[in-house]
Amino acid sequence: MGKSRNPRRSGGGAEAVVEAVDGGLAELMPDRDRARAWTLLIDGAPQSHVDLDDPSYLSFEYQRRLGHVIDLVAPAGKPVHAVHLGGGALTLARYVAATRPRSTQQAVERDAALVQLVRRELPLDPNARIRVRSVDAREGLAKVPDGWADLVIADVFSGARTPAHLTSTEFLDDVRRALKPGGCYAANVADGPPLAHLRGQIATAAARFPELALVADPTVLRGKRFGNAVLVASDTPLPIAELTRRAASDPHPGRVEHGRALLDFTGGATAVTDEAAVASPTPPPSVFR
């Protein structure tokens, strides 16, 4: 696949990289405000932001919220076993490696051409213990040993939609199998009004995990706009107070829902099975403007 250099330049003079990958047209756009930072877009939809000089910097709102989950899944600095379903530019795997040295990680990104592009243009720290598998997310998850993971993060999009087979109770059964007792599952869920997909995903998680929390922009939770919500689940109590404090202090403050209020939010939605699963809704064009 040919690589082309886009003539657009950042303030530091870096050029965009544009390349066809398996999932569409990938663009690596230089960040004009950070010397060695890049945003990955696929067919115009922003997928990841990486700062090679500071991998602990998380630019995207939803990735900061996933970063809070990473920070709270174990004592500060303690190495963890993490599984990332959906790799993109490996932003969160880099974050774990930077904030929890000696962690062992598996990233599953089915787009092999994208993985090659990211490895070439945004090289990983050679000391980071990150194994990348270029297979489907459920196929990659199935290869994770029973009880291996402290953390499973699902951030998988085909285009701008989460594939249907990653939204079901059967999928979450395999997540639970891979998690250690007390381990944590976190998913990036994208939806807009009337929030039917998000409500269904909460009900699905509630059918498999006793402890849940949802972190999102209040306007998204009110059904006022399309956006991302981070769904967190575990078989043991979650650090709700600290998660709430961190989400509220973000540049774009988030709200944490949990307990009875979160179950009420589902509005009677039922758990999704493989047989009935559908992909997440297509974002409106205005989301990426």
Image (cartoon, helix red, strand yellow):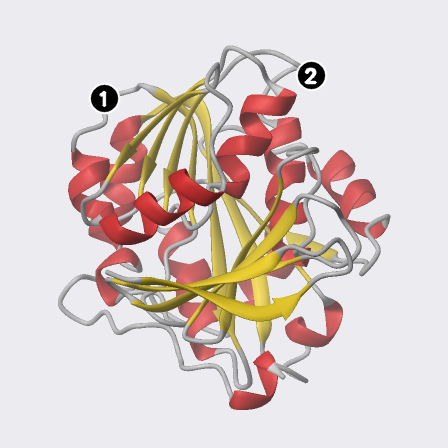
Residue 58 shown left or right of residue 183 in the figure: right
Cβ–Cβ under 8 Å for marks 1 and 2: no
Q: How many marks?
A: 2
Which residue occupies 60% across, 11% down?
78
* First-in-chain label (1 vs 2): 2
Q: Is residue 201 above or below residue 45?
A: above
Which numbered marker is on residue 76?
2
Which residue occupies 73% across, 76% down?
219
Q: Secondary structure at mark 1?
A: loop
Quarter of the figure with residue 257: bottom right
Quick one: 143 or 261, which is closer to the camera?
A: 143
Image location of residue 28, percent across then percent down: 51, 59
Q: Amino acid at mark 1?
A: Asp
Q: Is residue 28 visible?
A: no
Label 1 belongs to which residue?
146
Q: Amino acid at mark 2?
A: Ala
Image location of residue 235, percent across then percent down: 44, 31
Quarter of the figure with residue 243: top right
